[in-house]
Amino acid sequence: MTDDQFMRLCRDNGDFHFEITAEKELIVMTGSNPETDRKNANITMQLGVWATRDGTGVFFGSSAIFLLPNGARRVPDGAWIRKERWNQLTEQRKSTLTEICPDFIIELRSPSDRIGVLEQKMDEYIRNGAQLAWLLDPFDHAATIYRTAHAPQRIEHPSVISGDPELPGFKFDFRQMFLQA
């Protein structure tokens, strides 16, 4: 499938999210339920507040598609790219399929996700250039932190997760995802 065909598929089927693995397997993801979407919005909000204050990069929510160096097309739940890397992209690439692996990735486990598949995806992000990646699991109340050249670190019942040193000053309040209105 060409990049144009993939983008057309995404555009013509707005109720779904699509990814393509490095092995060219098409993955169809349905829209999220309201509770998962609320958690995703919280992720985007916390990342966005920090990124706006910090000013060293750009942040993305759960619908941006990134073309990784291995050919996979991925849609993380949250992402951040250093400004100097983002600004090296052409305006056309910024507005279509972005050929870049974000520096930071957040994936939120949803009810339909298999943990083993998510763990493989997190490893893929690190192998393709992400410096830091977080797998947030609201069902087990846990977070797994992935870093370049380090083994994944699982944290049970975290309160606040620090982005230091890769994202200086970013403190993600894990508990906010569980606050009720």
Image (cartoon, rainbow, N blue to C red):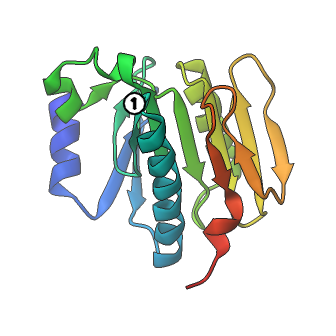
In this rendering, would 105 be left or right of 91? right
Q: Residue furthest right?
A: 156
Where does the C terminus fall, quadrant-wise?
Answer: bottom right
- From the image, tell me which residue sits under label 1: 24
Q: 4 or 137: which is nearer to us?
A: 137
Residue occupying the point 22% across, 29% down: 94
Residue 49 in picture, x, y percent from top left: 47, 51
User: For the point 63% across and 30% down, which residue is it?
Assistant: 132
In the picture shown, does residue 6 fall above or below 70?
A: below
Which x, y percent locates residue 146? 70, 32
Residue closest to the eye, 5 or 89: 89
Total labels: the figure holds: 1
Residue at 21% in and 58% down:
13
**Could you tell me residue 168's position as x and y percent?**
62, 31
* Residue at 54% in and 38% down: 105
Q: Amino acid at mark 1?
A: Lys
Taking the image as shown, residue 106 lies to the left or right of residue 173, namely left
Res 77 seen here: no
Q: Left or right: where does residue 51 sit relative to residue 2? A: right
